[in-house]
Each structure stands twice: as structure tokens, then as C-alpha cells.
Amino acid sequence: MLIIGIYGGTGSGKTTIVNQIASNFDTSEIEIISQDSYYNDNSNISYNERCKLNFDHPDSIDSKLLHKHLSELKNGNFIKQPIYDFKTHNRTKKTIITNPKKILILEGILIMCYPNIRSICDLKVYINANSKTRMNRRISRDILERGRTHNEVLSRYTKTLKPMHEKFIEPTKIYADYVIENQGNNEINISELLKKIKSLIE
């Protein structure tokens, strides 16, 4: 199994590029796992307390469980992948049975903050976008998909997302095998990346 880590700041366009990569392979060959499924289980605290948590800090991710699951898949075993609910800021009681495939894409903003996750990834791809582009994308997404208000998202971006990006995410750019520019209007070229992926699985 080839494990590809796709990472970059919030709103950098990771999902778009992940989908572009996946569209070049049969669904039987490729699996996608999001870091977001591995936020810590916060059942032990109230909803109001969960709302105050910093979900953009590396401590918010259950990196041990994520690494364990990646290792299981790499060894040919299935996993019970957690399901996270962004409206309640907590894991649900349900899981998804995920089976190993030829290619696994792991995507998320924080995945390269953990040495054990970095070491298990065969290919690391950083998606680069400027702060204004990322902010606008994040506002649109959180209003549409996560039930947030404009002011709520803008405040969180300014107070939490931007400083966390500068402290934890931007520095992990040095670990990338590929850096893809996605500034909004430029055409994204992933042809070289696709050639590399196909050469590695062949």
C-alpha cells in the first residue's frame, strides 16, 4: 500500500486536489482518510466546553490511533474508522469499516506535525495558498457545511486558525516531497505528481 499525505493550511484546497488525484484511479484501487475523523473523543466534557477547544492544535488529534490504523491498513488489515460530528464537536458512536487498497490518501492540516505519521507516509504533498484565499474558502465552507455564522468563522480564523497555521502547519512545509500552488485562479497541474504515484505503485 502506498500512503500519500496531502496537507496544508485550512482552505488551501486539499479536498479538491485529493479528488483530482482519486479521479485518475479506479475506486477499487484508492481509499481516502481524513485527519478530521481522528479528532479526540471528547465525550467526557460538555458541549459548551467542547466549543472552547482548539481544534487546530496538534493536541486535538488522536495521532496514536491514526498511526495504529494506518499501520493496520499497511499490513493488510481492515480498520474501524471513527466518524466525527462537527456540529457536536465529538465522535459519534458509529464507525466505518475501511479496507486496505493499493493507494491510501491521508489528508489534513496537521498530519505532518507527528513524526510517526510522517514516517509512515511514502509521499508527502503540501498544498500552498495565501492567507486571504484560505480565509475566504474557510468562511464559505463552514457556513455551508458546518452550520457556522460568518462572524463566528471570521473570528475563529483570526484568533485561532491563522496563528495555529503559522506556528504548526507552515513549518511542516519542509517535509514535502511536492509543493502544489493553489492560489485561487491559477490552473493546478498535478501531472508530475500523478506520474510519481503511478511509478511507485507499479
Image (spheres, rainbow, N blue to C red):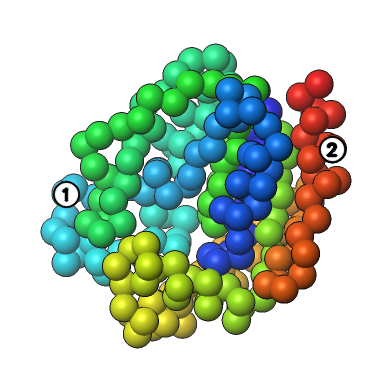
Identify the mark at residue 44; answer none if there is no mark.
Answer: 1
The mark nearer the N terminus, 1 or 2, is 1
- 96 vs 175, left or right, is left
Name the one closer to the observer, 164 or 32. 32
Q: Amino acid at mark 2?
A: Lys
What percent of the width, then of the height, locates residue 108?
Answer: 53, 51
Q: CA distance from mark 1 to mark 2?
A: 46 Å
* Residue at 45% from the left image edge and 75% from the top image edge: 139
Q: Which residue is mark 2?
A: 195
Name the one closer to the observer, 91 or 13. 13
Identify the mark at residue 200; answer none if there is no mark.
Answer: none
* Residue at 78% from the left image edge and 50% from the top image edge: 190
* Residue at 25% from the left image edge and 34% from the top image edge: 94
What percent of the width, then of the height, locates residue 41?
Answer: 27, 45
Please determine whether, in this image, residue 180 is positioned above or below residue 106.
Answer: below
- 31 vs 190, left or right, is left
Marks counted in the figure total 2
Mark 2 Cα shell of 10 Å, populated few (<14), some (14-19), many (≥20):
few
Mark 1 touching mark 2, by CB under 8 A?
A: no
Residue 146, image quadrant: bottom left
Residue 118, image quadrant: top right
SS for tag 1?
loop
Res. 64 in view? yes
Name the one closer to the observer, 166 or 10. 10
Please determine whether, in this image, residue 38 is positioned above or below residue 86.
Answer: above
Q: Amino acid at mark 1?
A: Asn
- 50 vs 54, left or right, is left
Please determine whether, in this image, residue 78 is positioned above or below residue 177.
Answer: above
What percent of the width, then of the height, locates residue 40?
Answer: 33, 47
What percent of the width, then of the height, locates residue 70?
Answer: 52, 29
User: Dividing the image into 4 quarters, which one contains the N terminus?
Assistant: top right
Residue 100, image quadrant: top right
